Every structure is written in C-alpha cells, then in structure tokens.
Amino acid sequence: MQAATQSETAISHPGARNRTEVFAVHGADPEILAYAMAKYSRSALSMRESLAEISAQRAEQFLNTFYFQYGHRSIADLAHIAFAVERLSLLAAIVLVDEQRWDGQERSTRYQNFMKSGWYLPDFEGHAAEADLYTRTVDGLFETYERTSAAVHDLLKRRIPRPDAMKPEAFERTLRARAFDVARYLLPLATNTSLGQIVNARTLETQVSRLLSHPMAEVRDLGAKLRDAATGPAWSVNAGKAAALVEKLAAREPELAAEAETLLTREVRTAPTLVKYAQPSEYLMRTRTEVEQAAGEAMAGVPIARAPRVDLVERTETLEVELAATLIYWGCDHAYRDVRDVVAGLPEARVNEIIELGLRHRGPYDEALRAFHAGAALRFDILMDIGGFRDMHRHRRCVQIKQGFTARHGYETPGSGDLPGGIDILEEAGVLDEYRSAIEGAHGASTELCASQAPEAALSALYLLPLATRVRCLFKMDFAEAQYISELRSAPAGHFSYRRVAWEMYRALERQHPALARHVRVTDFTEPIDLLKR
C-alpha cells in the first residue's frame, strides 16, 4: 500500500478540526452579546452554547466584575448600540460626534431645506432683552437663508441649461442642492438637526462623560439623555407588530400567547450595565480650565495673525515642544505655527510644566487627552468656515484639535459657487449686501451677548454664529490620510468650501514633499466642473 502523505495524515487525525464555521448573530442584546464574545477568552464553549446559557442577570454580574472592578474595558468594545438623536442644535451635534471611534450620519445641509428644522433656544432665566436679541438674530438669519436659497436657485436656472437627457425632476433637485450649498453659510449653530450613531459601549461611556463635562447646558443634557437611552428601555421597531400577533394568538391559544408575549414584547435595555456609572470627567474639566489659563499667559501680547487657510507646519520642534504647543493651541485662538514658535522659545522647565498640566488630574481609568496623540509626520493648521469644517470633521483617522468657536476670525463669503467665468454668485443673485449684513449682524449680536451679565449669555452667544464663521482646527496625520483627504475632498461632487481646502492641502504637500505629491490623484480646484454632477 502507498504511504499516506503528511497532509492526509493530519486531516485524518482524530484531533484535527479543519471545518471553519462562520455565522452572523442576530437578536442578542448588545451587553449579552459582548459577554458571550468575551467568554471566548475564558471558555471553550461555542457562541451558540454561550448565548444559550447566558441571561441578562449573569451578563450584568460578569460585567460588574471584569469591566468595573478589573478594568477590562475592551469588553465594552464588543457591545454596539444604535441611537437616534433628534432635534439637537448644530453646535451640540459637532460636540457629540467629536469621537475618534464613531460611526453615524447626520442631516445634510447640502441636500435638505433647514427652514422647517426649528432652532435651539437657551434658558435666559428671565433676561428678556438678551432673549429678544437672540430670537431676532436667529429669525433674521433664517429669513436671509430662505431668500438666498430662492435667489441663487433662480440664478442657476437662468445660467444652466437642462440637458435633454436629464429629467426635469433630477435637474431641479440638483439645482436646489447647489443653492443650499451657498445658503447654508447663513444657518446659525442654533439650527436643529438630527443624526444616527452606532457606537460601542466603551466609546459611548467616554462620549457621555465628555458631554456631561461640557460647559453648555444643552450638551450636558444630551449626555444625560444618551446615558438614559442606553440604560433604559429601547424602542423596538417591531413592537406594534409583535403586540398585534400576541393579541391574535390570545384569542386562539392563550398559553401560546403568554409564551409569545414573553419572547416578543420583552423589555430590552441595550447597555444597562456598561454606561450606568458614566459621570462628568474631573480630568477634562480641571485640565481645560488650567490649560486655558496657561494659554492666556503664554500668548499674551501675541496678535492673532490672519493665517493662511491651510498651513502645513513643518516639523522643527521636539516632541516635548509639540505636546506643550498642542495643549496651548487647544486653549487659545492663535495659529499653530505662532503657538509652536512661542512654546519653542520657553525654558525647558516651563515646557515640561505645560505638559504636566495636561496629565496632572488624570485618573486611573482616564485616557490621556487627545493633545497627547503627537508625533504625526504632517500637521495641517486649517482655518475655514464651520460648514465646511463639519465635512472635514468626519476624517477620524487623523488627530483633530479644534479650537473654540469665535467671531474673532471673521467669516467666509461663498464666491462663484462653482459657476464658471469668475462670477460672484451672491452679487449676481442680488443678495450679497443682505448676506454680509446678516452675517455681520449675527457676529455683532454674539459679541453683545458675550458682554452681557445674564447667566449663560456668553455661552449662548455661540449659537448665533452662522456656518460662514471661520473656525480653526489642527489636523495631524500620516501621508496616507493626507493623500486620502486630498483625493476624496477635492473631487467635483464635493462642496466648493472643502474642495478648496483639499486642493490647498495638496499644494502645501507638493511644496514640502514634491516627490510624494506626485502620487496624489487630486482634482484641480481652479478648473471648472460640471455643476449638474453631484
């Protein structure tokens, strides 16, 4: 008989198990599923066997021991929870989604008319003058938004012929979206939006803690509502149908109906254990206050220069100076290049003191602040309109250090809106003066509220800032991410605001690293595009 080969011998061996099995799991509550997955590290049971024996009570006991007592936070990475967050302000939405581990979608200001959205009204605690100024300013911005949308839409219809191959409905929809691209600059941060997010329980716990630590009441309330939604009964999409089925069964088979009711209409709590202890972060709150004070001292007397829209800040400083400079940048309104140069001139002991500020109040389970994600090869300091920033904000593979919202950097005015021939789209539409008046009026009202003695007035003033307002953010990344952003965001289908930023990122990269820039498939922002392609 011919001898068996080595592979045949291995396959026929009684101990061999070569049949890989893969199956999707549906219907398990997020925390129970997380427990079952975590058991792979401690048990030889299969997923089916683990889920069959686990109850909600056992899952809670396990998580209380291994998650809270032993600090095994990776277990919470396995519990994913979907949330609908509706009727929150644009300002609160920006704060909410500022997580590096986050998945979700928000209402688009490019494709939807926000006239029906409503807006957030802070509690002015009886200060009628401040409340009236706030309301008049928001109303004025929305009125100008509506007139600008209509005027730009009419202009586009006059300027752009409809191709025979394009249906009238698609043509109209595309032009309206182009009009919203321009009008969205007028939307205040008070504007309501809605979003959906899917996050794991560890990210949710961090997110809730961060929101509860925020100085703004709406954001703190949002953090509490997220925690309540995770620990309380979840909304079931099939609840109505399940109840109707149980009712039908009850008329025929009462015993079967009772069993079905237990299974189909049971109360589900998506994360009753993993986020129940989420509280405001003393580390974040105390550090933010001390860093802002240190930034004020370090940058005192340094003017806020009108920096370029995109500045690729070359690496000349030590890692220690970068860490200290990033912390100071977080606490001020200055450009990173200016901050870096100031910090680089400080004595080494003072640089180390600033770094210490960022870690002094860190608790046993706190992750270090985002400012400590240092050492990236490329640092783009970007100053752009808030509307465009919200699109750039989605790039989570890079480290983002956003400064606070302020009117100090001025605002952007949409130029051609992608119309060819160097046309000023607002002037051509007859609304340029009204646009400027509305934006400057909102900035003036925001400044006036900041000077008010009414409680919360200074914070409420931020809601009046329109999306045209410039915001500064430092984006730290590797070459692959710079390549990705430049290629994706410069594409013709994008909004002209971030297309210009992506193009300028590429140009800055080209100046400093010309050999690498050859590998970026960027779209030239200066070349005309087809406005009917989205």
Image (cartoon, rainbow, N blue to C red):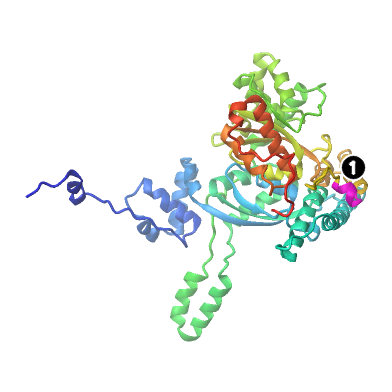
Question: Quick check: 428 left or right of 335?
Answer: right
Q: Magenta stretch: dominant SS?
A: helix
Residue that lies at the very extreme toward the front in this rendered image: 164
Q: Which x, y percent locates residue 89?
A: 75, 51
Label 1: few (<14), some (14–19) or many (≥20) C-alpha neighbours in 10 Å: some
Q: Which x, y percent locates residue 329?
A: 71, 29
Q: Which x, y percent locates residue 18?
A: 27, 51
Find disc 1 in the rendering and name its residue: 440
Q: Is residue 290 visible?
A: no
Does residue 230 lie above or below 252 as drawn? Answer: above
Q: Nearer the viewer, residue 395 or 446?
A: 395
Give the residue at x 16% y 45%: 5
Residue that lies at the very extreme toward the top in this rendered image: 347
Q: Is residue 416 visible?
A: yes
Label 1's element? helix
Question: Quick check: 473 left or right of 67?
Answer: right
Q: Which residues are magenta?
A: 425-431
Locate residue 362: give its quadrant.
top right
Q: Which x, y percent locates residue 160?
A: 80, 55
Locate residue 295: give its quadrant.
top right
Does residue 243 lie above or below 470 as drawn? Answer: below
Give the residue at x 32% y 50%: 44
Q: Amino acid at mark 1?
A: Glu
